[in-house]
Image (spheres, grey):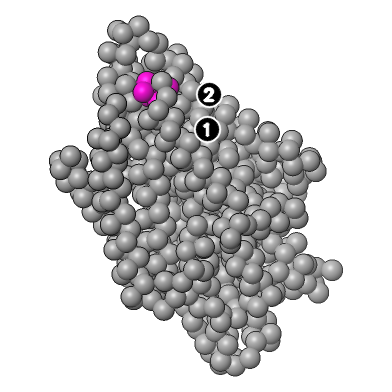
Amino acid sequence: MKHTAAMRALLAEYLGLALVLAVLIAIFGLTTRNFFAPVTFRTIANQIPVAILLAVGMTLVLSTGGIDLSVGSVLALSGSVFGLLLVKYQAPWPVALAACLATGLACGAINGLVMIRWGLPSFIVTLGMLEMARGAAYLVTDSRTMYIGGNLGNLSQIAVAGVSLGFILAVVLALAAQVVLWRTIFGRYLIAIGTNEEVVRLSGIDPRPIKLAVFMLSGLLAALAAVIHCARLSSADPNAGAGFELQAIAAAVIGGTSLMGGRASVVNSLFGVLIMAVLETGLVQLQAGEPTKRLITGAVIVGAVILDRYRQRGQ
Amino acid sequence: MRTNDRPLSWWLTLLAVVLLLPGCQSAGPSDKPVIALIMKSLANEFFLTMERGAQEHQKQHGGDYQLITNGIKDELDVSRQVDLVEQMIGQRVQAIVIAPADSKALVAVCKKAQDAGIVVVNIDNQFDAEVLAAQDVKIPFIGPDNRKGARLAGEQLAKKLQPGDKVAIIEGVPSAFNAQQRKLGFEDALRTAKLTLASSQSAGWEMSKANQVVAALIAEQPDLKGICCANDSMALGAVAALQEAGKSQQVQVVGFDNISAVRQLVKDGKVLATVDQHGDRLAVFGIEYALEILRNKTAPADRETPVDLITADKLK
């Protein structure tokens, strides 16, 4: 890999999305009273760790040409297990945390194993998991929201320069994932599988363990997101995360990750998450009505992807 | 993997079959009247409580009637609920007690049920009066006055504030009748107490959405003093957002529904008040009313059920 060329391409990539983001911020800064204030940016930063973690997982899955529709439900199920252990069984938090992460990992493993064993498309397998995990979440919580409160609430209050622990963790993990994707053999395999799985197989590399790993990773990240989600809201809600999978997909695609696989950038997905979050917060502050919000959000998603097309052509 | 590719239509058919299966339970032969309870989302704690109340009631009055309960996946799945009513008509139940997911879209199919000789009782979310009139159909509504309940909560909030103080309303799904009623109730209370309505926005009944909306609102309007949430899930989300912004002391929150998770917050003073509309009894009221109509062949008329304000004092 030629580093200078890669760096230049990198700059060109980030510039487009950063521009969209800057335009949005400028518009909201001019049209609302307090958007352009540190408190707004802190609010956004504290809100997006869940979206970031899910987008990271989704980007890795998409890079192999797969898709994981189950992340929102897996988040709900892992969070429910977490809340249940803390509240109902009074378990110490490390135990609850371990069980929560194990739940996410297990869901991801089931997704991966079923896909591989029966050669099914990830779309249908994870759609099944979307239903199963949601159902399981309702079962374990008896469809009730549990108030956790106590120590967990304080956990989300820990902040460095006003920015929550969750945000820092999410950004660090996203950067780590980017390094994995671009600088490790595992990352190369992901892209290679997404580009042409048959060629990977013919060159003597078994793609199956790699695909299993990427779905397990996605499940694990969803569970980690669940912990942050529960800590933020001081409660475990079996309805949590509905529709988050689509947001994660949108963030990744805005960032130029291909739904067909073979092309992915975690850092760009991060921009995708930021664009959506800035949009949501800004529209609330503009007092836009619900229909307007949806209209604009949808238009910006499509607009960003169109821009991405031009950017690719330019390269 | 492309080893076992099938056309999309194949998968969609499979999906349809899987999704339709749970609807196929049979009423079974019996001479007891069969009452079908058609709910909104059974994933929602509120409707689950309602359903449990109904099942409990059926057990105690097992000799009087048979109960079939059905719910939809989420509260917006209107067409699925229409299918459920159709299925119940097909099963020739004697009465349908329905919490419609949409106050207009379900009217036509309920009229069809009535035409088939089935008693239809409307609970929870009231059918739209204009559509009922347009379709020339009368469906009795038995349930709480959501506007009155919201007004009670709003008045409790007003007691803590001064005239001119800024208050925001977090609405439910804007198209839902009870969401609209609760919003009106909050507005009634704010107007009477001369509070300023700073913003009214929907968070679609959802906790995390409310959290995001309130976080943005409080950044934009740092002098906010109160938040009226149209349900308790959204109140939980609002409280978390206020805590994060360090505004818990400054901003008072009220909710609606009295779900278990919010009771602790009411006790701790983090939520000022919520409204109990006796969810566990709502379906039962409907069933009892349906039985009464079946027994006496009475002409259907609307009936109101109680709503009560829940504050920290009442929970001690």
Disc 1 to disc 2: CB gap under 8 Å: yes
Dot 1 corresponds to which residue? A219
Q: Is residue B191 left or right of residue B55?
A: left
- Residue at point 68% right, 38% down? A97
> Considering only order in the chain, which callout, 2 or 1, is on the residue closer to the N terminus?
2
Dot 2 corresponds to which residue? A109
Q: Is residue B214 left or right of residue A247?
A: right
Q: Where is residue B2 in the image (x, y as percent from the top left)?
A: 30, 17
Image quadrant for the N terminus of chain B?
A: top left
Q: Does the magenta stretch include residue A189?
A: yes
Q: Nearer the viewer, residue B289 or B77?
A: B77
Label 1 sits on a secondary structure element that is helix
Q: Which of A189 and A176 is in front in this view?
A: A176
Residue B233 is at least partly visible in this image: no
Image quadrant for the C terminus of chain B?
A: bottom right
- Chain for numbered disc 1: A
Q: Which of B71 and A228 is in front in this view?
A: A228
Residue B235 vertical placement versus A2 (above, below): below
Q: Which amino acid does label 1 sit on?
A: Gly
Label 2 sits on a secondary structure element that is helix
Outermost residue on the right side: it is: B316
Q: Which stretch did the figure color magenta?
A: A186-190
Q: In this view, does B218 lie to the left or right of B16?
A: right
Label 1 environment density (alpha carbons within 10 Å; few <14, some 14–19, many ≥20): many
- Residue at point 69% right, 85% down? B160
Total marks in image: 2
Q: Which of B25 and B99 is in front in this view?
A: B99
Q: What residue type is labelled 2?
A: Ala
